[in-house]
C-alpha cells in the first residue's frame, strides 16, 4: 500500500494511465491492457480533473491518494484479469471511494508477460453530499457533514489510529482477501495454479526472499546478478524437495481451515452470554456485599466461596477457548511435520550407493534445515497444549476473586479460622492466594 502527498496525484494518475509524457512506455512495447475509474464527484468530468483538485485543495501535509500495486496471474486471459480487478475493486472500495485503475503488461526478467494492476483511490469517503472541489477536500465536520469536507478513512478501521501490530494485521488481512479473490478467479478459469500471499518463512519453504528491483535497476548487471543467483538457489531447493514444506495453497484445504476457525468463533459467540451472565452474577454478588467487618464469619466464608465459584466458571470458559485454539495449532503443525517426514530423503543402496552418497548428503542436509524447525514448533505446540490442560484453574480463580474483592479476601482467612474453631475441627491451612492477598494488601 503506497500513499501520495499533495502535488503528486495528477502526475501519478497520468503515469498509470500512460498519458502525456508517460506514453513512452507503450511505445517501448509495454501493453496498457485496460483502465477504468469510478465514484467520481459530479464536478470531475475526468479522473485527471479530480486528482488535479486533490493536489490543489488537499492539506499540504495530507494524503491525496492511496495505491495498491498488485501482480496479476499470467494464467488468466486479459478479460479474466479485468473481471478479477473489477470484482476486487467492488469488494474493497464499492461505492465508498473515488478510484482509477490500470493494468500494465510489460515483459518480466524471464521474457514472459508481467501483468499487474495499479489501483489508485482517494481516502475521501463518498457520502452523497454534493460539494464543490474546494469544499470536497476540506477537513470533515462530524456534527454538520454538509458544512465540511468529505470524511477521510479507508478499510474496516477507517478513521481510527492503529498501533503498528494492528496495521500489520490489517495489511495481512488485505493480502489474504486478494489471495482468495485471485485463487477463486484461477479456479473459475480451470487453472490449477494458485497464489500464496504468505512469506517464505511462514510457509517453511527454506527459500530466501529476493529484493524487488525497478526496471531501471534490473537492467544494471551489478544489481541484477545477486537477485538472479538467489532465484537459482531457490529453484535448486524446490527441485531437490518439490513437496518439502511448500504448503502450496489448496483452495479446498484453505476453505476447510477457515471453516474450522469460523466454528471456533461461533462457539465463542455461543458461550459469550454464559460468560456475561456469570460476570453479571459476580457483579450482583459484589453489589450486595456489605463491609466484611460487620458480617458474621459464616457469611464471609459463604460469600467468598461464591465469588470464587463464579470466577472459576469464567476461567474455565476462557481456558476452553484457548485450549481449542492450541489444539488447532497442534493439528496444523502435526500435518506439516508428517509431510516433512514423508519427504525425508532415503539413503542410497546397492552397487551405485557410493556414487550417489554425495547427492544424498546434500539433499538430506537441505531437508534437515527445513524439517527440524518444523519439528521443534510441533513439539512446542504440544507442550503448550499440555500446560493449558493442566493449568491450575482454582488458583487463578482465587487470584481473580481476590482482585475483585480485596476486602473480602483479607477478611476470609480470619473468618475461616473462626468458623473452624466454632465447629471444633482442626484449623486448616488457608489457600495460598488468600495469604498472598493478605500479605500484599488490596490490588490497586
Image (cartoon, rainbow, N blue to C red):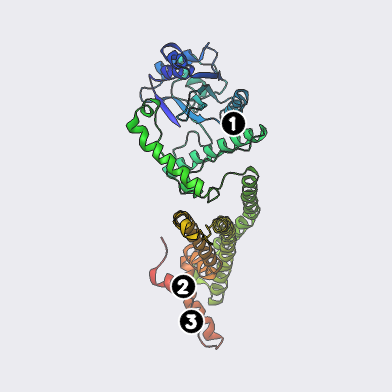
Mark 2 Cα within 10 Å, few/some/many (few <14, many 20+)? Answer: many
Q: Can residue 165 be seen in this view?
A: yes
Q: How far apart are the two marked residues, 1 and 3, measured between alpha carbons?
A: 73 Å
Q: Which residue is drawn at 52% across and 12% down?
A: 46
C-alpha span from label 3 to label 2: 10 Å
How far is mark 1 from mark 2, CA to CA? Answer: 67 Å
Coordinates of residue 439 in the picture (x, y in percent): 39, 72
Q: Earlier in the sequence, mark 3 or mark 2?
A: 3
Q: In this view, does 233 lie above or below 221?
A: below
Number of disc labels: 3
Category of crowding for the residue at label 1, using alpha-carbon neighbours closer than 10 angstroms: few (below 14), some (14–19), many (at least 20):
some
Q: Which of the two labelled residues, at mark 1 and mark 3, occupies the earlier sequence position?
A: 1
Residue plotted at (49% across, 62% down): 380
Return the x and y of residue 13 as percentages of the image width and height.
46, 18
Q: Mark 1 points at which residue?
A: 75
- In front of the other: 15 or 213: 213
In the picture as drawn, the residue positioned furthest to the front comes out as: 351
361 in relation to 158, above or below: below
Q: What element carries label 2?
A: helix
- Disc 1 to disc 2: CB gap under 8 Å: no
Q: Farthest left residue?
A: 222
Q: Is residue 163 visible?
A: no
Residue 434: give its label: 2
Above or below, 22 relative to 75? above
Q: Earlier in the sequence, mark 1 or mark 2?
A: 1
Give SS at disc 3.
Answer: loop
Quadrant of the rendered image containing residue 129? top right
Residue hosting label 3: 429
Q: Where is residue 171 in the image (x, y as percent from the top left)?
A: 49, 38
- Asked whether disc 1 touches disc 3, contact meaning CB atoms under 8 Å apart, the reply is no
In the picture, which quadrant includes the N terminus?
top left
Amino acid at each position: 500500500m503506497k500513499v501520495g502527498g499533495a502535488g503528486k496525484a495528477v502526475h501519478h494518475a497520468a503515469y498509470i494511465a500512460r498519458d502525456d509524457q508517460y506514453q513512452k512506455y507503450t511505445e517501448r512495447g509495454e501493453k496498457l491492457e485496460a483502465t477504468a475509474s469510478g465514484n467520481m464527484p459530479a464536478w470531475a468530468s475526468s479522473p485527471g480533473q479530480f486528482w488535479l483538485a486533490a493536489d490543489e485543495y488537499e492539506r499540504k501535509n495530507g494524503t491525496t491518494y492511496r495505491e495498491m500495486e498488485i501482480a496479476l496471474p499470467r494464467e488468466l486471459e486479459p478479460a479474466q484479469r479485468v473481471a478479477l480487478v473489477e470484482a476486487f475493486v467492488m469488494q474493497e472500495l464499492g461505492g465508498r471511494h473515488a478510484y482509477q485503475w490500470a493494468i500494465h503488461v510489460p515483459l518480466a526478467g524471464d521474457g514472459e508477460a508481467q501483468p499487474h494492476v495499479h489501483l489508485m483511490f482517494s481516502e475521501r469517503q463518498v457520502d452523497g453530499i454534493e460539494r464543490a472541489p474546494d469544499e470536497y477536500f476540506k477537513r470533515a465536520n462530524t456534527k454538520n457533514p454538509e458544512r465540511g469536507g468529505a470524511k477521510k478513512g479507508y478499510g474496516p478501521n477507517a478513521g481510527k489510529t492503529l498501533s503498528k501490530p494492528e496495521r500489520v494485521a490489517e495489511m495481512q488481512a488485505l493480502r489474504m482477501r486478494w489471495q482468495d479473490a485471485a485463487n477463486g478467479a484461477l479456479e473459475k478459469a480451470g487453472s490449477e495454479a494458485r497464489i500464496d500471499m504468505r512469506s517464505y518463512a511462514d510457509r517453511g519453504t527454506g527459500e530466501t526472499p529476493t529484493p524487488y528491483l525497478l526496471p531501471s535497476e534490473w537492467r544494471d548487471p551489478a544489481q541484477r546478478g545477486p537477485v538472479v543467483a538467489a532465484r537459482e538457489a531457490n529453484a535448486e531447493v524446490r527441485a531437490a524437495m518439490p513437496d518439502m514444506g511448500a504448503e502450496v495453497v489448496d483452495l479446498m484445504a484453505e476453505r476447510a481451515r477457515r471453516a474450522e476457525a469460523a466454528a471456533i468463533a461461533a462457539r465463542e459467540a455461543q458461550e459469550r452470554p454464559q460468560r456475561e451472565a456469570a460476570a453479571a452474577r459476580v457483579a450482583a454478588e459484589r453489589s450486595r456485599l456489605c463491609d466484611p467487618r460487620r458480617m458474621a464469619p459464616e457469611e464471609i466464608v459463604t460469600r467468598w466461596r461464591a465469588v470464587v465459584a463464579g470466577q472459576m466458571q469464567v476461567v474455565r470458559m476462557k481456558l476452553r477457548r484457548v485450549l481449542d485454539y492450541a489444539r488447532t495449532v497442534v493439528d496444523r503443525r502435526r500435518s506439516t511435520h508428517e509431510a516433512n517426514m514423508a519427504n525425508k530423503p532415503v539413503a542410497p543402496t546397492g552397487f551405485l550407493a557410493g556414487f550417489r552418497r554425495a547427492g544424498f548428503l546434500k539433499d538430506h542436509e537441505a531437508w534437515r534445515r527445513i524439517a527440524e524447525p518444523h519439528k521443534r514448533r510441533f513439539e512446542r505446540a504440544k507442550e503448550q497444549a499440555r500446560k493449558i490442560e493442566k493449568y491450575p484453574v482454582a488458583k487463578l480463580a482465587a487470584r481473580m476473586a481476590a482482585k475483585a474483592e480485596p476486602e473480602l479476601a483479607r477478611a476470609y482467612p480470619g473468618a475461616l479460622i473462626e468458623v473452624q474453631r466454632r465447629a471444633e475441627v482442626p484449623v486448616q491451612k488457608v489457600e495460598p492466594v488468600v495469604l498472598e492477598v493478605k500479605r500484599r494488601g488490596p490490588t490497586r
